[in-house]
Amino acid sequence: KAGVTQTPRYLIKTRGQQVTLSCSPISGHRSVSWYQQTPGQGLQFLFEYFSETQRNKGNFPGRFSGRQFSNSRSEMNVSTLELGDSALYLCASSLRGSGGDIQYFGAGTRLSVL
Amino acid sequence: AQRVTQPEKLLSVFKGAPVELKCNYSYSGSPELFWYVQYSRQRLQLLLRHISRESIKGFTADLNKGETSFHLKKPFAQEEDSAMYYCALSGAGGTSYGKLTFGQGTILTVHP
């Protein structure tokens, strides 16, 4: 089975721009979660999508949004980029997104905001 | 609120020595606990989870609800165990869908 695929791997943007990151889950997985990883804050949960619906959301401003398509692929969008948004963004897929499910991670998209 | 604490940012041991990576958690219900590992230039991957009660690569972890701990142990460390280790928690119910709460991670270095 192919693993979780994230594109692009690297992005450089300037303050005020917006960015879209893409995540293709493992075939058959319907839950996609997004995380932000920074040296200072570590891994923080952004949100989770299941069957095209956002079921859970972390403590991030509304500039961070996402969506999921009928084939379970997911996108994450960050508008009005700030310097502090520079981070590694990870997505993870699981079968159902329930408590005991194993999450499988992508390699991440490294976003640099200048 | 759920919280995971890994008190050691760095841990160094010699090959063949026992190793224990500490993890404490805070959660009001019944948590699901995981250990994830990230080897150099590889993606984050599951090492083990408490509900499986299995040993992976010689590592074991026991959930101690009384002490709210889920420490990772291996009796004889190997050089290939050098990596970043994350303890993670998932709760139950709607507020936990797809959400893992991670500790800050412990970098384990096993010296030859």
Image (cartoon, rainbow, N blue to C red):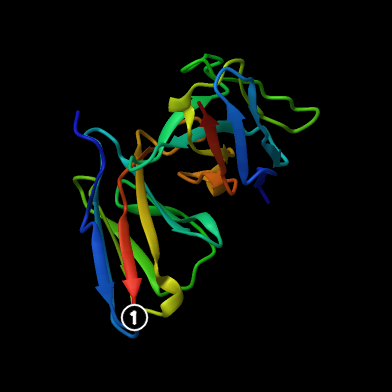
Choose top left, top right, bottom left or bottom right for residue A86. bottom left
Residue B1 position, x and y percent, is: 68, 51
Residue at (68, 34) in percent of width and height? B22
Q: Is residue A91 above or below residue B23?
A: below
Q: Is residue A71 above or below residue A29?
A: below
Choose top left, top right, bottom left or bottom right for residue A89. bottom left
Residue at (24, 36) in percent of width and height? A3
Q: In this view, does B34 lie above or below A109?
A: above
Residue A27 position, x and y percent, is: 21, 34
Question: Most extreme residue toward the right, as rendered?
Answer: B66
Instruction: For mark 1, name the chain.
Output: A
Pick the front one: A52 or B50: B50
- For disc 1, the marked residue is A114
Pick the front one: A85 or B39: B39
Residue at (31, 44) in percent of width and height? A106
Question: Most extreme residue toward the bottom, as rendered?
Answer: A16
Q: Is residue B40 visible?
A: yes
Q: State the SS at label 1.
A: loop
Residue B50 position, x and y percent, is: 58, 23
**Left or right: A19 as drawn, with respect to B86:** left
Mark 1 neighbour density, 10 Å: few (under 14) some (14–19) many (20 or more)? some
